[in-house]
Image (spheres, rainbow, N blue to C red):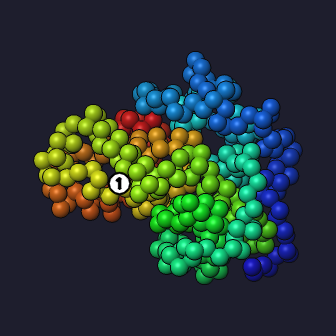
Amino acid sequence: MNIINKPLKIIQSRFEYKFKKRQEQASVSGLDVPNNQTIEQCEVKNDYIEPYKCPFKNVDINECTVIDFERIILTEDDWRKIISQGSFEGYSLKDVQVSLLYQPLEFHIRRMWAQFHIKNKPHIPYLTLVKQQSKYQSQIEKDLNRSCIRDSEYDGEFVDQNTDSLRDILTAYSNYDQELGYVQGMNIIVASMLQCYDMRHNDVELINYEVIDNRDEMVFLLFDHIMKELGWRDLYVDEFKGLNIQIEFLDQMIQDQLPELHNHFVAEGLQIIQTGFQKYFITALMFQTPKQFAAIIFDSFYLEGVTFIHRFILAMLIYYKNQLLKKNLTEIIPFIRDQMIRDFFNKVFLITPTHARLQLLSNLKFI
């Protein structure tokens, strides 16, 4: 890696670097989780999260209709406290959810936030798994160039390094989970994660330094967290049985909350299974998502899993309801499959001021 007119500086971890720089401003104890509690060990009581079990399976965030911005937006100090204490005690789930959408985390906090979810994972011999030949190697190689890493925005060095990292992580996971192996869609998720957590690409303070980093192993563990703890593995196994269940659930949600649109789909002879929503689930919303928004998706996805995906899709359908009602079968499918999510990000997530964007998302029943 080239050093441009600056002395070599080796950064072992972003956490160590950033907080050494800011040690006069705050004291941060690190990512140790007190009493062996994890993010999964909490529940909602009186709208506040207490240590016990995961709240996210039983809480309807859609109940949020009025946003008190002065009260709910978490500061960087709040995020430090959550990460340091290893729980959301003292914070409402609504505040966490809205804050993630309101103010994307600074890169060093985002890295810590990601590591927060994998802190207590058992050891997995990533480096050993990378060195083993995978029986899926041929398919992995074919999909490397379909993974949205090769972009004119990135220089050749960045592209080559991330392509190698993508190959390593997919190879390691296919060796680790031999029952499942490798399935298309995994490449899109991992490629997006590599871009989100790359230090040099995301942190301008490091752009001219050589960086020693454990990003690839962290992304591997995060991907395993998505597959196991968030249940994404279930979408792929048994001939995509889990995916079909999620599509059926989405169909029921549309029928219940958007009956006019659902009736229009039926009248056009369209089944939800035909629309292209499968790619939204298989790629965890990364397919067609502009990369500048991918980190926002991951931040919330780690909290809520599939619930977040359902709410996101429903919000898009509410937003485009009138437009979809005017389309016929041959127009609906390509719009949903190839255009809707990209347009939604560009039209809704770029609204300024941010308060107006959040209020629109609230009106769309997203928060």
In the displayed structure, 352 sits above or below 149; it is: above
Q: How far across and how far down the image is residue 157, in percent? A: 65, 80
How far across and down, in percent of the image, does residue 38 sit?
70, 37
Placement of 64 over or under 352, stated as above or below: above
Q: Is residue 7 left or right of residue 70?
A: right
Dot 1 alpha-carbon crowd within 10 angstroms: few under 14, some 14 to 19, many 20 or more: some
Q: What residue type is labelled 1?
A: Phe
Residue 134 in picture, x, y percent from top left: 61, 73
Instruction: State the quadrant of the C terminus.
Output: top left
| Quadrant housing the N terminus | bottom right
Determine whether, in the image, residue 267 is placed left or right of residue 49. left
- 35 above or below 334? above
> What residue sits 74% from the left and 45% below the top?
120
Nearest the camera: 184 or 74? 184
Residue 209: name its quadrant. bottom right
- For the image, the number of numbered tags is 1
Q: Where is mark 1, residue-wise?
A: 277
Q: Residue at x 61, y 60 (%)?
A: 177
Q: What element carries label 1?
A: helix
Instruction: Give the residue at x 49% y 65%.
Output: 183
Residue 45 quadrant: top right
Is residue 224 visible from the viewing direction of this image?
A: yes
The front one of 332 and 71 is 332
Task: Residue lying at the far left in this picture: please name it.
Answer: 267
**What residue is rendered at 86% in x and 52% in y?**
20
Question: Outermost residue toward the top?
Answer: 46
Would you say residue 347 is visible in this rendering? no
